[in-house]
Image: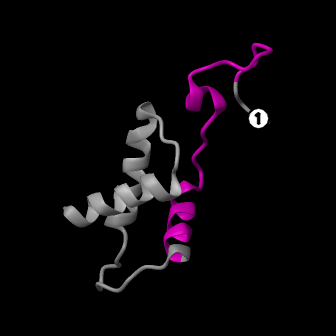
């Protein structure tokens, strides 16, 4: 547990310099994902490239619109859907 918190603090103070409190849960979720997926089923370390490939393959077929992301409509009243 101490290892996770030290990695989180290092990320917040080093990589993400200006973190707003209302976005903190997103940074914690990212660090929790990295911590939980640092090794494969055989106990071998997973590289950042392998972790990225895994995330991209899980994102296929999913769609996030501007409205869903922000809870706002676009300025011209259009929905946040890009054709």
Q: Is residue 58 magenta?
A: yes
* Residue 53 at x, y percent in the picture: 56, 70
Residue 17 place in picture, x, y as percent: 52, 49
Instruction: Kindly identify the residue that appears in the image at 61 percent across and 42 percent down.
Output: 63
Q: Quadrant of residue 2?
A: bottom left
Between 12 and 40, the one lying in front of the other is 12
Residue pushed farthest left?
A: 1
Judge whether 81 appears above or below 41 on screen.
Answer: above
Residue appearing at x 59%, y 56% in the figure: 60
Q: How many neighbours does mark 1 have within 10 angstroms: few (below 14), some (14-19), or many (20 or more)?
A: few
**Colouring style:** one colour
- Check the picture and name the quadrant holding the C terminus: top right
User: Which image quadrant for residue 81?
Assistant: top right
Circle 1 SS class = loop
Task: Name the residue: 57% across, 47% down.
Answer: 62
Magenta part of the chain: 50-79
Q: Is residue 43 found left or right of 23 in the rendered image? A: left
Q: Nearer the viewer, residue 47 or 79?
A: 47
The residue indicated by pointer 1 is: 82
Does 3 sit above or below residue 83?
below
Horizontal and vertical percent for residue 70? 58, 27
Asked whether 39 falls inside the magenta stretch, the response is no
Q: Position of residue 54 (x, y in %)?
A: 50, 68
- Image quadrant for the N terminus? bottom left
On the rendered structure, is 80 left or right of 16?
right
Give the number of callouts.
1
Closest to the observer, 82 or 11: 11
- Please name the residue shown 44% across and 58% down the image: 11
Compared to residue 55, the image places residue 22 above or below, namely above
């Amino acid at each position: 547990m101490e290892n996770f918190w030290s990695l989180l603090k290092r990320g917040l103070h080093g990589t993400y310099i200006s973190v707003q409190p209302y976005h903190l849960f997103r940074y914690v979720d990212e660090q929790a994902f990295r911590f939980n997926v640092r090794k494969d089923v055989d106990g071998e370390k997973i590289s950042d490239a392998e972790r990225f490939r895994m995330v991209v393959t899980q994102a296929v077929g999913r769609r996030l619109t501007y409205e869903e992301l922000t809870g706002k409509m676009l300025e011209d009243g259009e929905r946040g859907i890009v054709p």
